[in-house]
Amino acid sequence: MSSDTLAMSFPASSITQVAAGALIAAVHTAAARIGFTATVAVTDPGGHLKAFDRADDAPFLTAEVAVDKAWTSASFLTPTHAWNNYLADPSIAPLGGHPRLMAVGGGYPIIDNGQCVGGLGVSGGSYEQDQQAAEETLAALGFQVPTR
């Protein structure tokens, strides 16, 4: 038998409310520069909503889409745009039926010092615009931008 002790838990980090608010403000700034109005969702690493804001003229469906993008990216530690290729694989395709899985660009895990601290979901523009606003925001605030 090994002399190692059985680890019963591990410390987990989560994005702070201040950082979540900063992400939301920065996404709105990026979206305005890019040319669209955004809805922004930030979750903790478990996919639970931490902060949310929908621009006054953003379509109402963007609210659910932004939350699901944040949830999807935090759940799998993968940007949402990567899911288009994943779902082409017949062994993964059944996940496409999950009601919260969002395979559209604009969702990213929030990575701080190599650890996922939450998820970011941006909706309101084209998938390219959502993705660009999210990437610019994460980079500007010093978070890692996953590429896969």
Image (cartoon, grey):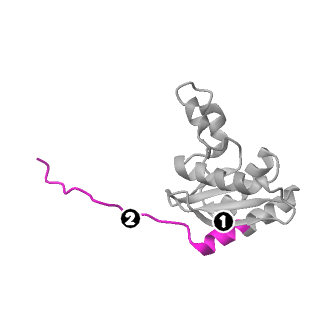
Q: Nearer the viewer, residue 94 or 34?
A: 94
Crowding at dot 2, Cα within 10 Å, few <14 / some 14-19 / many 20+, comes out as few
Q: Quadrant of residue 6?
A: bottom left
Residue type, numbered disc 2: Pro
Q: Residue at x 55, y 57 (%)?
A: 47
Disc ID at residue 77? none
Residue type, numbered disc 1: Leu
Q: Secondary structure at mark 1?
A: loop
Instruction: Report whether 71 appears left or right of 28.
Output: left
Q: Which residue is mark 1?
A: 141
Q: Quadrant of the C terminus?
A: top right
Q: Which residue is mark 2?
A: 11
For the question of whether residue 111 can be seen, the reply is no
Magenta stretch secondary structure, dominant:
loop
Spatial CA span between label 1 and label 2: 23 Å
How many labels, in total? 2
Q: Which region is colored magenta?
A: 1-24
Residue 21, image x and y in percent?
Answer: 67, 71
